[in-house]
Image (cartoon, rainbow, N blue to C red):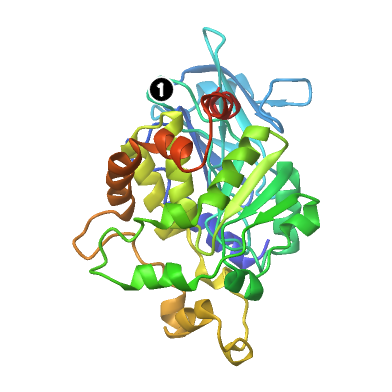
Amino acid sequence: MRITLITSLALAASIATPANAREAATLTRIDAANVTLDRGETVPVAIWISQDGMIDKADQQVEPGLIKAAGKDGKLTLAIPANSRRYVLLKDRKGHVNVVGERVLPLEQGSNFRDIGGYVTKDGRTIRWGKAYRSGAMPLLSEADYSLIDQLGIGSVVDFRSIEEREVAPDLVDDRTGALFIANDYSLKPLMANFGKGNGENVYQGMEKMLVPQLRALYRRIEANEGAVIYHCSAGQDRTGMATALLYDMLGVDRDTILKDYHMSTALRRPQWEMPKVNPADYPNNPILKYYYAADEKKRTVAEPLYTPSGASHLAQFFTYVDAQYGGSEGFMKKALGLTDADIVTLRATMLD
């Protein structure tokens, strides 16, 4: 494995799921060969390592003695290589099976690439693993990264980025996997103008209107259930964070968990892999390059926390706006995106165990 992968694994371990986020169990990568399973409140009588999240003959069962030897904190080290997408299945005494996967995929040259599954909703259901993956831009993925992504069963890639962003950092995942590629042609200039005006508060307000085609496409592709969906913007935190938060909220994840998941982007971003090295002079009218190269090289590799000058979360402010403007996330999906009650039912059936 390259040094860049080991750095990524160390980072993933250092930002293990925030305290109080509602998850039945978690997997955190230790190194290129091992993960830590935190079984949470589940007391398993059997554990399997699986390729598909379903117990079958192809699964590797963990030795019962190893389960019994787990520490009082419920943590267990399992041998799962970073180049293989695997799920861990925990069966309790009542026969119920909890599925857990690595939230952060250990890509060598990816940024903020994670499975959105695993969170427990307010009514006790669980977001399914392997249905949707969020990410930052992916112009510099390594061959090992493509090999790992090829195991995810990707059916669609929904790119939230503008024409200017795609011009300098095009996606290749669809070419490599055969996935359907969906994007909408719009200029980044109005979006950046919105970010640049005012006092830095409520910067997401109105962004949802600009992104209606992309958001509609994302939820429609998830609803279609034709393979997993990757969706992303440049940093995987603002447009992608908004899309994820709206989906989680509609599915019933509590907002405290949603906010904590949203703010994980600050630690998970690796800006050096979000933009290829280009000569800005070759793109004199490209606003993303003007913004990107306005900072020195050191600053370009540091992600800024997602808070306003007053200390408020951008997403918390956006939720307040969505509640007032649309009556909540489901209301937004119906009023702005044109989703029907049947669409909402299908989305929930697709995404929830």
Residue 16, given in percent of the width and then of the height, sits at 43, 46
Which residue is at the front of the view, 121 or 206? Answer: 206
The structure residue drawn at horizontal position 35% and vertical position 39%, both measured from the top left corner, is 326
- Give the total number of marks visible in the rendering: 1
- Label 1: few (<14), some (14–19) or many (≥20) C-alpha neighbours in 10 Å: few
Specify the farthest residue to the bottom. Answer: 281
The structure residue drawn at horizontal position 79% and vertical position 58%, both measured from the top left corner, is 175
The structure residue drawn at horizontal position 66% and vertical position 37%, both measured from the top left corner, is 86
Residue 98, given in percent of the width and then of the height, sits at 54, 22
Q: Amino acid at mark 1?
A: Glu
- The picture quadrant where one finds residue 250 is top left
Element type where label 1 sits in the image: loop
Residue 196, given in percent of the width and then of the height, sits at 34, 73
The structure residue drawn at horizontal position 34% and vertical position 55%, both measured from the top left corner, is 205
The reply, left or right, for residue 246 in relation to residue 79 is left
The reply, left or right, for residue 266 in relation to residue 277 is left
**Residue at which label 1 appears:** 41
Which residue is at the front of the view, 21 or 65? Answer: 21
Residue 237 visible in the displayed image: no
- The picture quadrant where one finds residue 143 is bottom right
Q: Is residue 31 above or below residue 117?
A: below
Of the 4 image quadrants, the one containing the C terminus is top right
The reply, left or right, for residue 96 in relation to residue 183 is left
Of the 4 image quadrants, the one containing the N terminus is bottom right
- The picture quadrant where one finds residue 124 is top left
Q: Is residue 308 above or below residue 59?
A: below
